[in-house]
Image (cartoon, rainbow, N blue to C red):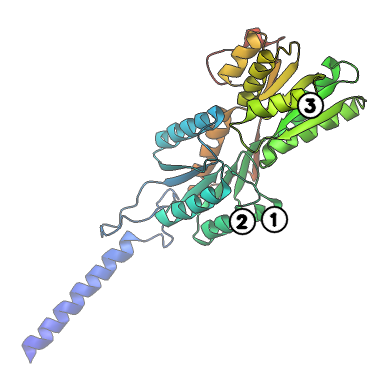
Amino acid sequence: MKKNVKRILAALLASAALLALAACGNSDGGGKSSTGDQSSTTSGSGSGEKDQLFIGLAMHNQTEDWAVQFANTFRSEAEAAGAKVAVTDANSTAANQVSQIEDLVAQGIDVLVVLPADYTALGNALKQAKDKGVKVVNADSKVDEGDQALVDCFVTADCYTGGYNAGLYLAEALPENAVLGELNYPQLSVIAVRFEGMRDALADKGRTDVTFVSKDCTDLSAIATYTEDLLIANPEISAFLCLNDNTALTCAGTCKQMGKEGILIIGFDGSPAGKQSIAAGEMTGSMVYSPVDLAKTSCEAAVKLASGQDVEKETMVEMWMINPENIGQQSLDSWT
């Protein structure tokens, strides 16, 4: 009997010791390290050590040069900060991105950084992330207004003002009764507002003589066809405002092939290829929308959110215009 009592006491003491060790290993009670970094314990290790910060980067695409540069810069910045990054490519398809976000959440990410493929389509996926305690950084195009409460911070640019400034330039440069072609992509709010800003600037400058002809570029591989269609239907076009530099470059090439000289062509990005085209007298200008600045700012926000630091609800990166007057001051081989 005494031996049994001793064995029971020994077992109780061992259990108490294990419980004490477990309490010490999780003394913050919130799954955070001493610096506040959101972490998870290594599955099955039993060691109590925390994994590195895990960021999911849900890209809208990885075909456009701007998007590739954003992802590369973000990955480099995150890894320099000691974080692990999983990057997905929605191939410009909302359904793909929703599925990819759900998968990233299932993998145990601490922070989601998302560049929407369709700003109206992500509500349920973002809610799932928030329900799991994932911090959300919305970069580039803002999600739909009804879903914005699910986002911890926005990192974008004042693209309306960027479009407005492009409109001011065009207001001075366009001939009387000009026809202006728009190569738009309204699925992304960050692009749609550029065209709104441009039209408002022309109206504010009294350019009610300008006629707009538009294409919604739902297929980004068909820019040459869209440009050709607009030029055939409207041979008097004297300018194009394009959704980005890649579109503007294709537009410029199509105009050249069709013998349409002297057409003003403005893009958005400030890409190396865009700047080289401006220097060569092909494109007229590009509104700088730096993927480098946007990626660095987005990564900084993600790291701060994960460590419990305060982050501004909205951060804007600067947009400004490169044109023939200032192209000589620009590096032509790197992103601005």
Left or right: where 190 falls relative to 2: right
Q: Residue 252: x, y in percent?
A: 67, 17
Q: Point out the frontmost of discs 3 and 2.
A: 3
User: Mark 3 sits on what residue?
Assistant: 233
Disc 1 is placed on an element classified as: helix
> Which kind of residue does numbered mark 1 sit on?
Gly
Three-letter residue code for mark 2 = Gly
Side of 122 relative to 211 (left or right): left
Secondary element at tag 3 = helix
**Cβ–Cβ under 8 Å for marks 3 and 2:** no
Residues at badges 1 and 2 in contact (C-beta under 8 Å)? Answer: yes
Q: Which mark is residue 156?
A: none
Give the residue at x 65% y 44%. Answer: 142
| C-alpha distance separating marks 3 and 2 | 39 Å
Per the rendering, the mark at residue 123 is: 2
- Using residue 81 as the reference point, say whether residue 145 is left or right of it: right
**Image quarter in which the C terminus is found:** top right
- Tell me which label, 1 or 2, sits earlier in the chain: 2
Q: Which residue is the site of mark 1?
A: 146
Examine the rendering and report whether any part of residue 309 can be seen: yes
Q: Position of residue 268 (x, y in %)?
A: 66, 26
Looking at the rendering, which quadrant does residue 288 occupy?
A: top right
